[in-house]
Amino acid sequence: MNQKKSKTPMIITLVLVAAIYVAVFIAEQTLPANSMLFTVLKKGATYALVAVSMNLLNGFTGIFSLGQAGFMLVGAYMYGIFTIPIAQRASVYQYFDGGMIQFTVPVIVAMILAGLAAAFFAFLIGLPVLRLKSDYLAIATLGFAEIIRAIFQWNGLGPITNGSNMLRSFPSFNDFNIRDGQGNVTVYLSTLIPFLMAGVCILLIVLLINSSYGRALKAIRDDEVAAEAMGINLAHHKRLAFCVSSFFAGVGGAMLAMYQTTVQAKSFTSAMTYEILLIVVIGGIGSVTGSVLSSFLFVACSEWWLRFLDEKQMIGTFEVPLLRNGFRLVVFSVIIMIVVLFFRRGIMGDKELPDLLSRRMKSEGRRKK
Amino acid sequence: MWDTIFPYLLSGISVGGQYALIAIGYTMVYGILRLINFAHGDVFMVAGIIMVYIAASGLPLWLCIPLVLLITVAVGFLIERAAYRPLRSAPRMSVMISAIGVSYMLQNLVLYITGGLNKQYPTIPGISDTVAIGAAKTKVVTVITPFLVIILVVALVMLINKTKIGMAMRAVSKDFETSQLMGIKINNVISMTFIIGSFLAGVGSILFFTNYPTVIQTSGAMPGLKAFVAAVFGGIGSIPGAVIGAFIIGIMENIIKGLDVILFKAGVISAPLGLATFSDAFSFALLIIILVVKPTGLFGEKVTDKV
Amino acid sequence: MKKLIALVLALMMLVPAFSVADDLPVIKIGVYEPASGDSGAGGKQETLGVQYANAKTPTVEIGGTTYKVELVMADNGSSTDKAPSAAQKLVSENVSVVLGSYGSGVSIAGSDYFKDANIPAIGLTCTNPQVTAGNSHYFRVCFLDPFQGTVLANYASKELGATTVYCLGELGNDYDQGLITYFKQAFEALGGMVIVDSFPTGTADFTSYLTNATGYNADVFFCPVSIAYSTQIIQQASAQGLEIAILGGDTLDSNVVADADKGTNVKVVITTFYQEGANAEFDEGFKAWLNENPDMMTNNGGNDVISAVSVMGYDGYYVALAALQAAGSTDGAAVMAALPSVEIDGVSGHIKFDETGDAVRTSAFVKTVNNETGEWQFVTEQTVD
């Protein structure tokens, strides 16, 4: 059926993506820089990458891992540790005599290091854990994330991780803006750059999914035994997927550090993993497009659009009942439950944007006939 | 030496007993549905919050306790009806995600109701009093806990082994489809499982919060996770396994907290190492070790996958 | 029926007439405080001080125009990962100056957002030096941890006669760990011994940590933790019959903690910014205001005992107003430029900033809980030489 796979939907998709990037760039130059929109876009791009990396495991390989927050933590710390300017170290590591590491690397190198470190941890963890079956694997990875958190907070490692104290002063998204001599911003890039970072990483994941490796991973997801019978090396492929996913989770962690401007191990809890998992589910397990879309929707709802629910609202002189701090999250979790229970396939199911486009073109073609 | 270790053992046995009551809920649900009920720890927390509000309404305590247990059971029952039953034919991952969603919702709901503030758990006369055991002082509830746990577990095991519903439960956990064919009303059995699990979580919450009397929306997360670890450690699906696992986890955790002191007093180390930092991490490390060495846990049955 | 509608309409017309200030231009002050999470209780009490000051002085004259002051609240959830969007919310609402936060970690986490938007921030009770160090936009009205740690160490050594102190802080909490570090430095300099332990976030069972303190034969149990944990510690200490004093920092200064200690035998001693009774006019006004507003009373923990953090919130609000007046503009950058030279006589004492932007403070109040009444009692005003 699909022998003559048309290239047109693919091209349309690329044009659409390019258009989004141009729109982001223009919006950033024209709209006020302090708009909530940009916060949502920055955090959304970060979460999109992390969600896609989780989808690679849960959706495409069928490994149910709940260790994402742990790998993000590793990435965020690696990024922070290697990019805090030397001049700031004495102040950041004030309880540890300026820390042990006394050099910095460029941002891009630090991001790759962040990914590699997370992948390395994943490799170590994967050795024992990947042999486990679904739920056991989930709980074991969840446990590993907790262990990583405790290790990074340990005072004994203080000269490297700053112990219980946060890392700060490293380059953040806002440092990507181009400034003139007086420090005034001439070109805003603080939203475009995270978009580019996430875009490149997601593209790499998509390429992997569409390669022969990706097909092997999907075969493992659909039926492990059959896949093994077909000659797919289970251990090798699972480990590969686990390390690649963790690599990008680590890069995502570095981006989260840039977004937050500070890093503290305390905030990388299992609740963060659950949030990302819910994003994947809302987007559709097994759809990269879905994960990306739902990341932006999720972040926009939780940080921006639903915020009015947390404050008293007056319609004329009538005070809307129930609205007070925390109501936003109640409404939000009810929406999530509705999606989980009644729209189980999420926004996209396992379809991608090109799939939708090609179906649409087909039906239009039929109509023309 | 014994005097040094004893207070830690006491704390461990007490908290272990409370983990045990939560762990039974995990292990029974897993035994029947093959579902990690992530919301179970939050049911435990909700039981605590309900107690806070009921006691604040001025009802006498002898009425509060059964009322709390009743509402907790209702909450557990409703969660199963609303969030798990519609997904009975869905892949296991969907149900687990639904459980995570329920957990998220319960926490947010309690955050909203309490305004994010810690709530003081009411004092229960009799079990909140202080009692001295040798050199150590503790609350009466600490002493009661292990005995209460044993009584409840014996009653539960009798229920499972001697009654008709117990037989149905065993049948369902052995083979879901066949027992359905044999005319067992699966839904009733599952509801019953959730009722028992929530009841025990309710009892556990009364004991736990009497000991550590502050309730907040995240109060259930850690005890829930630890109890789950205990259930896996003991061999998931096995009730005695969950109980023994819970006591081991509880005791080990408290020994780790006090390891510096114990070693210091024994003259092994001259300065504290700060090992208490790893009290939580240790439980998880233990979990992973047992999973790798013996994936079925201490008392779990071996399951073979059928293709 | 028509009459009824007419009446309702007439009443609705009247409503705006009561609030005269409505047609005044509005100036926004951001309140960046936790309303949930571990520090939620403290954050709410701190916000109360700001709200009371705002109720008392709802307008400000800037450059000849009278503005109505509107408070914009943002809940940072006591957590550094929720802090950025809360900070960004204030920035996007174009506030002129930010007050807060309770808790040093979240203050640092929000700091860069205010800096990038050229909005000055006034820390109310964030005592960690890192909040204001190395930047020109963050100011602070309270004392600092190196000072507080020294005061506490002196008190433990000289007044309580301690030689060994057991310190317990939350893992990954900048405030706890920072204050413990400064305490340790000062106490060891006085010739004492300090043992430090940390507990993971979300811990409820402190019994083994209390046993540790007894095991080390400590003379004082120092736990500068958040309100949620300190109530647990105090109640469990009471059950275990802990005989040594519990020492705490400014976070413990809350009626919630005092209530937890009521009816027990545990001695709780803390350092703080203000002692009820030091300014009768403020005390009376604040209590009356709480009693008029049941919501506010709930936020204060259900009674009208004054917490020092509320006082700091109150003073912070007037510092902000003074800065706005001195700047003669609502622009953040102008306010920032005016802030270093602002001086006011606050309820908590005279407030004047040094070159890092910290208020010059030379004394702290030491308070203890009366175990029978559950009230805070003044012990002494401690200064460091």
Image: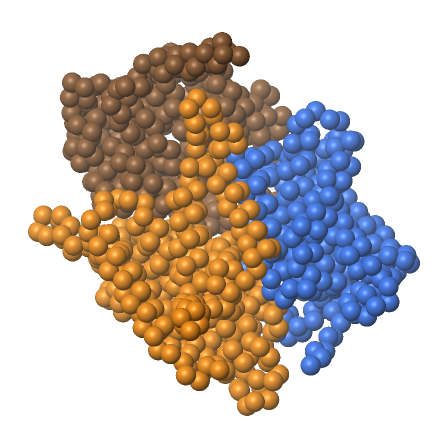
Chain colours: A orange, B blue, C brown
Left or right: C237 as drawn, with respect to B182: left
* Residue C264 versus residue A358 in the image, above or below: above
Q: Quadrant of residue B263?
A: bottom right
Residue A325's x, y, as percent? Answer: 47, 35
Residue ID at (40%, 44%): A305
Q: Quadrant of residue C132?
A: top left
Residue B80's x, y, as percent? Answer: 70, 52
Left or right: A138 as drawn, with respect to A120: right
* Residue B248 versus residue C342 in the image, above or below: below
Please say whether residue A38 is visible from this viewpoint. yes
Residue A156's x, y, as percent? Answer: 42, 59
Residue ID at (73%, 56%): B24
Q: Which quarter shows the C terminus of chain A?
A: bottom left
Left or right: B109 as drawn, with respect to B75: left
Residue ID at (63%, 38%): B49
Residue C339's x, y, as percent? Answer: 20, 30
Q: Quadrant of residue B128?
A: top right
Residue ID at (77%, 67%): B176
The number of numbered badges drawn on the structure is 0
Q: Nearer the viewer, residue A299 or C309?
A: A299
Q: Residue furthest front?
A: A369
